[in-house]
Amino acid sequence: MVKSSCFTENSRKINKVFTIMELTLIKIRQNKLKVKCYQGGELLPLIKLQGITRQYRLGQVQVDALKNIDLLVEEGDFISIMGPSGSGKSTLLNIIGCLDRPTSGIYELAGERVEKLSDSKLADIRNRFIGFVFQSFHLLPDLDAQANVELPLIYRGMGGRERHRKSLAALEAVGLAKRRNHRPSQLSGGEQQRVAIARALAGEPAVILADEPTGALDSQSGRNIMAIFQRLNREQGLTIVQVTHEENIARHGHKVIHLLDGQLEKEEALDHPLQALLEESTAAVS
Ligand SMILES: Nc1ncnc2c1ncn2[C@@H]1O[C@H](COP(=O)(O)OP(=O)(O)OP(=O)(O)O)[C@@H](O)[C@H]1O
Ligand SMILES: [Mg+2]
């Protein structure tokens, strides 16, 4: 791991023994401690992709899912990735989330090269740095909302009391503390997705990666998810990268990345993202 210089806002050098990754997490988890991390005099982005390619080989056929992708994600960004089906959106998100490795190119996460790390190191990074949200929620049906949110904390070896506190705080952040004892089947689709977001938040990740988070939801539930993302982004400075097919979902972020045939077609900065308000459904759920 590369050691780099980190300074508090009043330029006091704080610690040389931590890696940039560890300091980024300390900074995110104790957001009062403003730490800026530099390498060679340059402020580090949270995510930096350079010349990323991903090829799949199926027998004689080679699929170029990603071609020479360069991408910077700064801390506090809210980015939407759009593109037609098959354009490489999920492949890109999986590489950013260390679920997959690029065929070639450089990936730096919080200043550390990660593209060639072993499976177990990538799993550790995923566990500590990344919160995933998927289209189909992936909640365990026999566990109630709070137990679902606690699961990743159990994998981290966290004690019961702390788990309980963090999972409750995460459910509060998505407006579902009162439904903590409900199982997924007793929640609407939009509420299940909010539990999935709480599960991603509970681990206090550096970045939330969401693949079609509203793809299985009606439009109001989709807007609720955007309202939660916008509030987390605005109030906690949480970095969010979401993949979506839907223009009106994409436009809730600050920037839209358009992919076409595995290539970055254009980046569009949004000065006035759509604003979403969390509206509770009036429909009764048994
Ligand atoms: N495991 C795999 N093996 C072979 N080809 C794959 C694999 N995964 C993805 N691909 C191919 O890579 C390309 C990009 O796939 P990807 O899933 O990233 O697209 P996408 O933009 O997320 O599409 P969608 O909007 O349908 O989810 C596609 O041509 C797909 O068929
Ligand atoms: Mg996809």
Image (tube, rainbow, N blue to C red):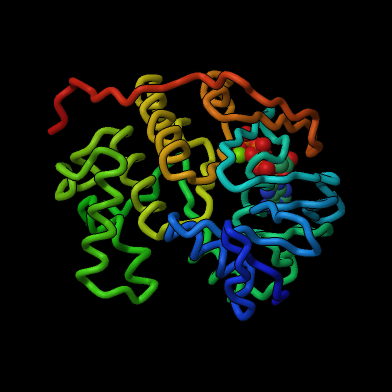
Name the residue rendered at 35%, 26% in the picture: 221
Where ligand 1 lies, by quadrant? top right
Q: In the displayed structure, does residue 234 sit left or right of residue 45?
A: left
Quadrant position of residue 149: bottom left
- Above or below, 140 against 197 in this view is below
Is residue 53 or residue 61 the one in the foreground? 53
Q: Indicate left or right for 251 with 28 as reference.
A: right
Residue at the image point whose x is 23% and y is 23% from the top: 281
Q: Residue 268 placed where, x, y %?
A: 71, 25
Q: Residue at x 35, y 22 (%)?
A: 277
- Can residue 99 be seen here? no
Residue at 58% in and 72% down: 14
Residue 85 found in image quarter: top right
Where's the C terminus, which quadrant? top left
- Figure label count: 0
The residue closer to the viewer here, 35 or 19, is 35
Foreground residue among 114 and 214: 114
Image quarter (top left, top right, bottom left or bottom right) of the N terminus: bottom right
Question: Can see residue 120?
Answer: yes
- Relative horizontal placement of residue 279, taking residue 203 as reference (left or right): left
Q: Position of residue 65 (x, y in %)?
A: 77, 45
Residue 212 screen position, x and y as percent: 52, 36
Vertical comparison of 158 with 133: above or below: below
Quadrant of the image occupied by residue 44 = bottom right
Question: Where residue 256 sits: x, y (%)?
Answer: 66, 29
